[in-house]
Image (cartoon, rainbow, N blue to C red):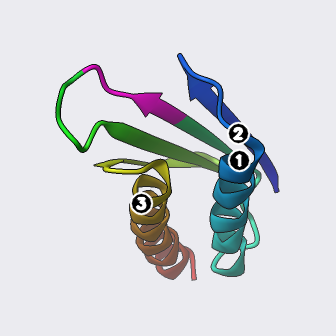
Amino acid sequence: MDIKVQAVHFTADQKLIDYVESKVSKLNLFNDHIVSTEVFLRLDNTTEVENKIGEVKIHLPGKELFAKKQAKSFEEAIDLASEALRKQVLKDKEKVS
């Protein structure tokens, strides 16, 4: 599975990128037909504490699954997004089976 991580309007350190890649790559355990994954990390321009946004898009043959979560840290946002996608992947796999 090809994983692309893009940080929008800031530079992500390698530790964050490694964390994101390890979290997202675990989705392959639930469906081995995942072609690629795109991850976008954004900072919201609000004064709120929860201003970190993690967006994850999974490309499967013939379709895309997407989750967007906002949290206090990028790690938490990616955790929430990958959990939402895990549910979507399992639901999609049940439909195909």
Q: Quadrant of the N terminus?
A: bottom right
Q: Position of residue 75 (x, y in %)?
A: 50, 57
Q: Residue 33, located in which quarter of the rendered image?
A: bottom right
Q: Position of residue 65 (x, y in %)?
A: 49, 51
Residue at point 64%, 55% (across, down): 20
Position of residue 40 in the picture relative to residue 34 (left or right)? left
Position of residue 51 in the picture relative to residue 73 (left or right)? left
Q: Is residue 19 magenta?
A: no
Task: Answer whether residue 61 is visible to the viewer in this image.
Answer: no
Question: Are circles 2 and 1 on residues that touch, CB within 8 Å?
Answer: yes
In the image, what residue type sits under mark 1?
Ile
CA separation in Å, label 2 and label 1: 7 Å
Q: Which mark is residue 17?
A: 1
Secondary structure category for the residue under label 2: loop
Please say if 41 is above or below 74.
above
Residue range corresponding to the magenta coloring: 41-45
User: Residue 4 or 13: which is nearer the viewer?
Assistant: 13
User: Residue 12 or 84: which is nearer the viewer?
Assistant: 12
In the image, what residue type sits under mark 2?
Asp
The secondary structure that most of the magenta stretch takes on is strand
Residue at point 63%, 66% (across, down): 23
Residue at point 29%, 36% (across, down): 51
Q: Residues within 10 Å of mark 2 (few under 14, many from 20)?
A: few
Camera-near label (2 vs 3) is: 2
Task: Answer whether residue 53 is visible to the viewer in this image.
Answer: yes
Position of residue 78 in the picture relative to residue 47 (left or right)? right
CA separation in Å, label 2 and label 3: 16 Å
* Pointer 2 residue: 13
* Pointer 3 residue: 76
- Earlier sequence position, callout 2 versus callout 3: 2
- Earlier sequence position, callout 3 versus callout 1: 1
Please say if 46 is above or below 81.
above
